[in-house]
Image: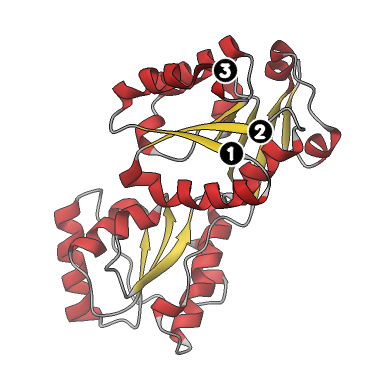
Amino acid sequence: FKGFREAPPHQIAAVYDMDGDLDRGRKLIAEIEEKIKPDLIFAVGIWALQAVVSRPPSVPVVYAMVLNPPSVLGADAKNVTGASMNVPVEQPIRLFKQLGPQVKRIGVIFNRNRTGYLVRQAQAVAREEGLELVTREVSSPKEVVAALESLQDGIDALWIVPDETTLSQAVVQQMLLFSYRKRIPLLGLSERHAQMGAVFALSFASGEDIGRQAGELAQAILSGRAPSGVPYTNARKVYLTVNLKAAQKLGLEIPQAILARATNVIQP
């Protein structure tokens, strides 16, 4: 919210807290439209965006701090854009590329309804980089173990995509065990994943900057651009955590080019 107000400054007419209650969120949207009559609504977090989707307001909406917004919005949202928490897919793919020619096939387990769009984007980037994504679809966390076993010796690295289906601690632990058993690097999406044993983690670095991105999108709309012509953004500030202790256990040497841009290095 601080970042949104700063870049550039906006006149905030009113602030509402839906307390995680979707019905309350719908009622607040109705109240905002009837009483405040704003030029734009700023929705912070996935619950606020879900409220917007369930009761679309007549004014433009800019969101922030949402993971995988296309899976929330669907194809019909015309009056909404925003700043997501996602790391651009180019970054993990190029990180794998930097590991060296021994990494060619990257394993990905995902739920099509949540991150199918992201996996398609990543496949296109991987092809450009001469890499291949080996994918397995799951519909629930309990299917992950079987999906991992089906990958077995067919991959050189494993990537935890930002898919809620695979983000529970139990599922991450299964992926870590697979990584160590097969002696292949695992890329997580939070510093916590690296602390748990992933060799790498890429994560958004600043909620304030995501708010600032949302403020810039809002300014574009308030200056006359249609929301449909203002594409949503991914995180532009990203943390890279490298776990040298985990790399050592896997017998993996981390290139200096990767270490040079790491935000945090976990030493052996």
Pointer 1: what residue? 132
Disc sitting over residue 179 in the figure: 3
* In the displayed structure image, the side of residue 139 where residue 69 appears, left or right: right
Is residue 105 visible to the viewer in this orientation of the structure? yes
Q: Is residue 237 above or below residue 257?
A: below
Are discs 1 and 2 less than 8 Å apart at CB? yes
Mark 2, secondary structure of its residue: loop
Instruction: Report the amino acid beneath label 1.
Output: Glu
Identify which residue, 32 or 67, lies in the foreground. Answer: 67
The Cα–Cα distance between marks 1 and 2, rounded to whole angstroms, is 6 Å
Q: Is residue 90 above or below residue 199?
A: below
Q: Is residue 257 above or below residue 71?
A: above
Give percent across and percent down for residue 183. Answer: 64, 14
Nearest to N terminus: mark 3 or mark 2: 2
Disc sitting over residue 104 in the figure: 2
Q: At x 53% / y 77%, what residue is drawn?
A: 9
Mark 3, secondary structure of its residue: helix
